[in-house]
Image (spheres, rainbow, N blue to C red):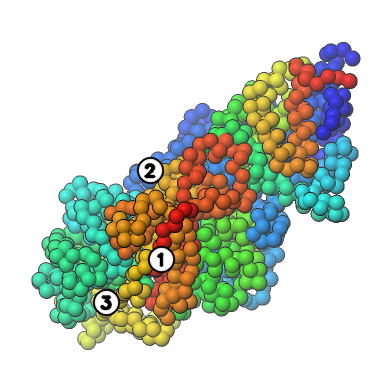
Amino acid sequence: MELSRRDLLTLGLASAAALGTLGGAKLVARSLGAPPERSSGKGTPGTTEKIASMCQACTTACGIIAHVRDGRLVTVQGNPADPNSQGSLCAKGVAAPSYVYDAYRLLYPLKRTGPRGSGKWKRISWNEAYDEIARRLKPIRESGRPEEFAFQQGRNRSTDMVTRFLNAFGTATHFNHRSLCSLNRRAAILASIGDSDWDLGDFENSRYVLNFGCNWAEAHQGHIPVAIRMMRAREQGAKLVTLDARLSNTAALSDEWLCVKPGTDGVIALAMGSVICSEGLWNRAWLSSWANLDPDELAKHLAQYTPELAERESGVPAETIRKVAREFAKAAPRCTTISNRGSHAHWNGFYNDRAIVLLNALVGNLGHEGGWCWHPRESWDKKAIPEPQPVPPKPSRRSAIADAKDYPLANGFKGKSMKVGGMAYQWIKERRQKISALMTYNCDQAWAWPDMTTVQDVLKDESLVPYHVCIDVMYSETAHLADLLLPWTTYLERWDIDSRPPQSLIDYVGLRQPVVAPLGESKDIREIFPELARRIGGGMETYFPWQTTEAYLEEYYKPIPGGFARMRREGFYIDPSKKKNYRPYEKELTPAELDGSIVDPQTNLVYKGQDPETTKPIVIGVVVNGVARKGFTTPSRKFEIYSQFIKDKGASAGKEIHPLPVYAPIPDHVDGFEDGKLIMISFKWNVHNAHRTMQSKWLQEIVHSNPAWLNPKTAAKLGIEDGDWLEVTSYRPRTTTVPNGDGGKLGQIKIRAHLTEGVHPLVIAISHNAGRWVGGPVASRSATLTSFPGYASKGDPDVERNLWWGNALSVAQNALMPNYPDPRTGQQAYHDTVVRIRRLAEA
Amino acid sequence: MSEARESDALAKSLAGIYGLLARIFQREVDPDLLDVLQRLGIAESASLLSTDSDAGAVESASEQLETLATEYCRLFLGPGACCSPYGSIQLGEALLGGRTEQRVLNFAAVAGLRIKTESPVAAADHVAVLFEILSQLYANAASSPRGDHAEDFLRECVLPWVPQFVAQVRMTSPNTLYARAAELAELALGNRTSNESLPLN
């Protein structure tokens, strides 16, 4: 621009004059003596206010106390008032400021201006965004086919609001990530005890904890609440034994690590059960009273699973299996198992966890202090603290995707509809159900889900997904394939009523509250959904009568002594009259409960009244040793070693599900491990959780790379040295029980080798939290250092100068992961993929 | 023209230019702003409204505005803004806001100004905030000579990063309206009431 100083003067004066004709808000005003508004925040300027809230860096939802100075979040500590986490907090929680003040957050509604996936956007106002979404959703609702609106969630701690919105809309096409997470474990527990789908071992009172593949020190859903109790148990002399294919940090914190071949935890548990039976270490009296299978029949069934068989299958020495079985039984009833994806995220995972749960019944530790416990509530007491009225009814129309009929145990348990979200995109691709609009929320399935190429292809295809709204804090691979982006608040800028399965065995309720004002124009769904409901109309709006979220929560917390104000102050409430949920099945039925009841002499079941829907008599308990007790909430009111229910469910879907805990070898793992073939397993680090933590500089500085773990013996056979580049090729499962189970080639990556004794010789272990490509300049890196669309690190000196790990390897492991569901439940088999590795001369 | 009158005129002029720059960088171009820019000769040709190489193709006014909005988003909003408009990021702070924002807030408070809470920017160290503060300080300096405030603000909060920011805009988005705005900012920053860096002609 060629301008003289006189030109500048002229232009400036003309600009000043022209500015007067321009409308629009100014950013700066005269202060008139008041302190600057932006720095005033909450509390007194210059002082640090401490605000109780709840974390959501992962799903554990630990209590936090946010330190806020002049409206800015300074740091976060654990809240001792949280009955679950009791004041402890992990690194992910401490990193809270790095999420709020991430320079690459989404802060404004953005509308796509180029082709889907082009990365071209423009800002629009919230008003425009609401209008556009309502314009797309309203005809779907009014068409009479509301299920054509699909909602995909990741970690959702606003369950009340999401459910209210979707039910008010009328869609049942709501998929979550449970089949990628905990479905098998939950189904195995439900089939056995009925009361709950989540075990809560009483670890701190336990003397022996047998851990089947749960990485509680790093990534378990109960992470901190479990970890602090485990450490207390150890201080008191408890023994911890961990079975895992990899030396996780949990295994490292244990007294013993038993290195198992993936997918064989079940046969080990059955062999331990066999030892316990054959050596008379069982609690025969408890089994006789409370199990639905005769102990001798059980012993006969288990006899086939010898420790020698388990050794051949798993690699764990038979003598070790015997020793651990004896130790476990000797500690009863103050002993417990814990399990997670290491045991159940397999093609045979449902059976594996059935066998693990059975171990507890064998020694009679169920519900005992220090034993294998549970709580019927996975969140707060919803009878005592009900949802504010009016509550919309559940959708009347079904969703072919949510029904997941191919997997009979996914939705087979009453009141526990778990769905099979992992298959949703495959089913959309098959056009099993028409989707007219998709809303994704806090989920990066285009990067994080198995068979991610299919997910991406579906999201790119406007004939399959004509409209896609993405709600998230940060840009993601999924957001990249959306039509409209809504900037979501971080968990430090929004409200929730929340709680988790109570590790102390007494239910509680917590409050998540904004500790700072939302950055930019980000909003929470508690503001977005009511406004959308008002614009969609048609009666939907009547379920959102509250003017503000505070008004809604004020009503929600009314039953709490001290109400909403108390919750804002303290963050948590626990009813002091409630007792720990020890041995709930032994509870005697009261005379009032027994009044008018009938006992079936054949089954000893106690019936009272009639189900108005089914007209069947209602079971309220069972007579055990002459006393009418509550029992378990299984069909037999006993601990169900033999489950006719799951057998029948399987038959109804044309599948055979064994009613007893059994071992089913993974078809692909039986043989064929030659020519560099291995089993790939995945894992998470203690500082990462899904896509959300990967843009945190603080956390990425701690863990930012994911080389492939290989056992040195395996590496030596294949001529691989530490640091070598590898080509890893994955294959789909070769079994007709899995979609596309043709054994064909699936994906290929290049990665470096990390040699360690801490992994099974048949295994290659690659961590999950890596290999993003559009998640921001801190999150997005790769093995090949290719450029990423839309992200220029130049101009951000902190990224340029201080991202010292910028060249570190970071590979998307999910590129190798097929859709691999357990045929009984739909649970993704994360640890069963067969791969072939080959050393490369160079990258 | 006396030195005082000249200084006063320059201050008024700078107030106008910084006000205009504040508006350009604060949010997308709308029809009113486009009209002003065209009248001022800053957006006089179609090529300045397009980032495409075939800018000669005739675009409607709404298409031109959409093209500019997309470019604004790419440069300043993201995802992955190419030219972060925040001082904290430009200066290499680990988090948005922080010390750089606090310096702006402190200075604004001393100068009797406040940043509106309803403003669409995420932190007070946004370049548009800085330009608007400069505009107000120069406007005040013109009416009652207090140019030292503007000079102090420039030295403390603006010059440490805004020149590199506008250079970045010029290079990242060449031949666009935003490159012209960046050049205008460079000229303005080079012309101060107390330090005449350009000769009068």
User: Residue A262: x, y in percent?
Assistant: 32, 66
Kindly identify the residue that appears in the image at 29 percent across and 48 percent down: A228
Inter-mark Cα distance, 3 to 1:
30 Å
Q: Amino acid at mark 2?
A: Gly
Q: Amino acid at mark 3?
A: Val
Inter-mark Cα distance, 3 to 2:
42 Å
A742 or A90, which lies in front? A742
Kindly identify the residue that appears in the image at 31 percent across and 57 percent down: A716
Report which quarter residue A384 is drawn in: bottom left
Marks 2 and 1 share the same chain: yes
Q: Is residue A538 left or right of residue A204?
A: right
* Location of mark 2 (residue): A78
User: Residue B15: x, y in percent?
Assistant: 78, 27
Q: Is residue A347 left or right of residue B158?
A: left
Determine contact: label 2, label 1, CB under 8 Å: no
User: Residue A324: x, y in percent?
Assistant: 16, 62
* Location of mark 1 (residue): A836
Instruction: Judge depth for marks 3 and 2 and give the one in front.
Output: 3
